[in-house]
Structure formats: structure tokens, C-alpha cells
Image (spheres, helix red, strand yellow):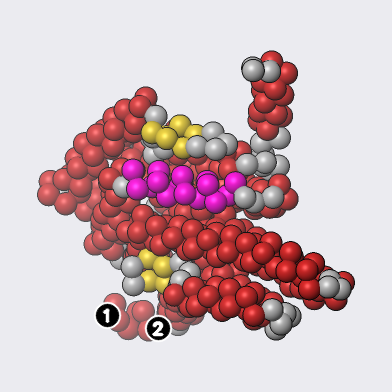
Amino acid sequence: MFNPSLKFQVLKDERKRKRCLLFRATDFASLMYPCFTVCRILGIFSYKFNAVNIKTYKPSYILSTISIFVFSIVYSINLYEMNVRGDKRYKSVGIPRILDFNSYYIFGGVIVISTFILSEPRMRCLQTILGLSLKLPLDSYQNLSRIIHAKDIFFLLYLFVGLYRYLSALQISIVRKLLMLYLSLFVFQMDMLYMNCVCILKACFKQINDNLVNLREVLTNGEPYLLNGASRNQRNPFLLMKITALKKQHLSISDSVRMLKMVYSLQLVSTILMAFTHITFNMYFYFLALVQKSVPLTSVEKQVLYEYFITFIVYYIIKIALMVWACETGKNQAREITTTIYNVFNSTNNKQIKYELELFSLQLLHCENVFSAKWITIDAKLLTAIIGSITTYLLILLQFLFTPHSCSGKST
């Protein structure tokens, strides 16, 4: 029989969830709401979601299709004018800057098109992660929301302010400015969405590890109080069922990690290559413009170039660092389960429990929960490589800045 008070309580809880949205998430929908909202504005998110489900939403899908269609037209025209027609405004900035523009547009275009093509697999991946997140406690949501919401909001504001200052100083058409703004925000938002999914999977791995720790405490502290064999036999089926449930949960999380790799591999490779090429070509252009003065620039253009250079070097370092942090801590959390199982195994003498733990350990060996993109593993080595390349470029620039005789000798 329908209960009106139950409906009122559900609506009350929904209004309370919306009021406590930022930094105090209570479910998957409120946790991902800021990210999903920006994605929907950009035409990326063609889904309708709530606390328990994600499904395709026809109006959003139509908006996404229109956005991709308009983007493809403007994108193609821009590449044609830059490379085929030979716009004077692009020729005047020199070859390094043209290479930088081409790499930026090519990798950004790959991310946009692949995002639209992989819309359905992405929805299934998000549905799977949503289902896994339903088992998380409220404390996990609130801890995640402090990290995810702060990262999504403040980092977006930093990028938007930097883009506004840079684009407002560029002497190009408003259409090209909007294209660059759209590409930058699009790539940023997809990277944030990936990091959010990794953080949720990391929380799921942590939940399994915490449950195993609690199981070890039960085996260590509870078994001495089981005085007779009947009580011990009654307790064992419950523990065996709990270990079996944890095995199934771990297998589902591992499947989600593989699905995440499949959906986001092309995007992540393009993002990493975009960061490397953007840093490389901008450093070289900075060297030509400010050190060797091969590219004629006014004082205002030099100031804009300097601000852009500093802003986006910091942007790429922070973004890659956050990505590496999420993937590295997620991998470590998954590997920590092996150590916990070993401790639980040594805490009991029950043969059935030990057998189930051995099966669980074998399952862990077959599940390589490493967050990677094709042939690139997103770990500390990647961040070290990027910081090392930036350091090398800066050392070269400083060498030429403080040894002007070498520049003059080469110029003559």
C-alpha cells in the first residue's frame, strides 16, 4: 500500500542532499554533480543521472550532437586557414608557434571526437562505478567530496582566469578564441572526470581493505570466546560468506579498472602528449622570442607571453601531478589488500577460512589493478619525466640569459 509519509521523507532527503551538495556529498550523484554540470554545459554529458542510476537522456544527446557538429566545422576551418591557406597571423609567429598550435588542435580534436564516439561505453563505465559506490559509507563520500569538489572548482577557476587573460590579449577572431576556450575546458573536464572515477575506485579498494582488517580483529579477538565447537561452526559460515562477498566485490572493482582503461586510454595518451608538446614548443618559442629575439614582439606581447608561459606550465604540472597522485594512491591501495589478506591468513587456524583466503590471494595475482593508458603507466615516473624536461629547458634558457656572448657569437 502506498505510504504518503514515505514519499514526503524521500523528497525531504532529496532536498537536503541538494542543500548539502558542495564538500558534503552523500551519494554518487552529489559527489559528481559539479563535474557533471560543467560537462553538460560543454555538451559532453549526454546522460541523465540520479543517486542510483545513469541513463541516456535524449535532449542532452541532441545537444551533444549539435555541439560536436558545430565544433567539427569551426575546427576544420581553423586547421585549413592555419596550414593550407596560410593565414598571415599564424605565419608571423614562427614555426615553433605553428607546431604548438597544430599539436594543441590535433590532440584536442582527438579527445573531443573520441569522447563523442565512446559515449555509450563511458555511460556503462559510470554505471558500473555508481553501482560499486553504493556500498561506500557516508564518511567516504564526504571525504571524497572535499577533495573532488575542491579540485574541480578551484582548478577550473584557475584555468578559466588564465585563459581569459591570455585570450583577451590575442589579436584573433572571437570564433577562434571560443574554439581555444572550448578545447581547453573540454580537455580539462575529461581529465577531471577520469580522476574522479579513479578516486572512487580507490575508496572501494580501501573499503575492502578495511573490511579485511575488521575480519582479522574478529578472528583474533573473537575466537577465544567461542568455547564450544557448535558456536565455532555457527560462526564460520558467516565469515566464509563475508570473504566470498569481498572476493566478488574486488572482482567487480577490477573489472571497472579495466573498463576505465579501455574508455579513457586514447584521451589520456592525447592529454600527456599535448602536455609534452605544448611545454616543448612554448619553451622553444620563448627562447626565440625573449632570448635570441628572432620573433619580433612588443613589450605588451612579451608580458602576455610571460604570463601565459608561467600560468600554463604551472597548470600542466598541477594537472599531471593530481592525475599521478590519484592513480598511484589507487594502485597502492589495491596492492595493500594483499598484505592485509596475509595478516588475516596468519590470524586463524580454520582450514576453510584459510582456503578462501588463498583463493582470494590468487585472484589478486590475476588482477593487475594498475591505472595506465595504452603503453603509458600513469605513475611517479611520468611526473618525473615532465618535471625533468621542464627543468632541462629552464637550465638551457638560464644558460643563454647569463651568457650573452654565446648568443652573440651564434648570431654573427
User: Which image quarter: residue 15?
Assistant: top right
216 inside magenta stretch: no
Residue at coordinates 61% horizontally, 38% vertically from top-left? Answer: 30
Relative to 84, is 95 on the left or the right? right
Front residue (pair 324, 281): 324
The answer to whether residue 391 shows anywhere in this view is no
Q: What residue is disc 1 on?
A: 412
Q: What residue is disc 2 on?
A: 405
Relative to 396, is 37 on the left or the right? right
Residue 161 higher or lower than 285, as above or below? above
| Bounds of the magenta segment | 120-134
Q: Quadrant of the N terminus?
A: top right
Residue at coordinates 37% horizontally, 65% vertically from top-left? Answer: 373
Front residue (pair 339, 401): 339
User: Which image quarter: residue 290?
Assistant: bottom left
Residue at coordinates 78% horizontally, 73% vertically from top-left? Answer: 229
Magenta-colored segment: predominant secondary structure? helix
Residue 195 is situated, as x and y percent measured from the top left of the image, at 51, 56
Front residue (pair 228, 298): 228
Residue 93 higher or lower than 381, as above or below? above
127 inside magenta stretch: yes
Residue at disc 2, secondary structure: helix
Q: Quadrant of the C terminus?
A: bottom left
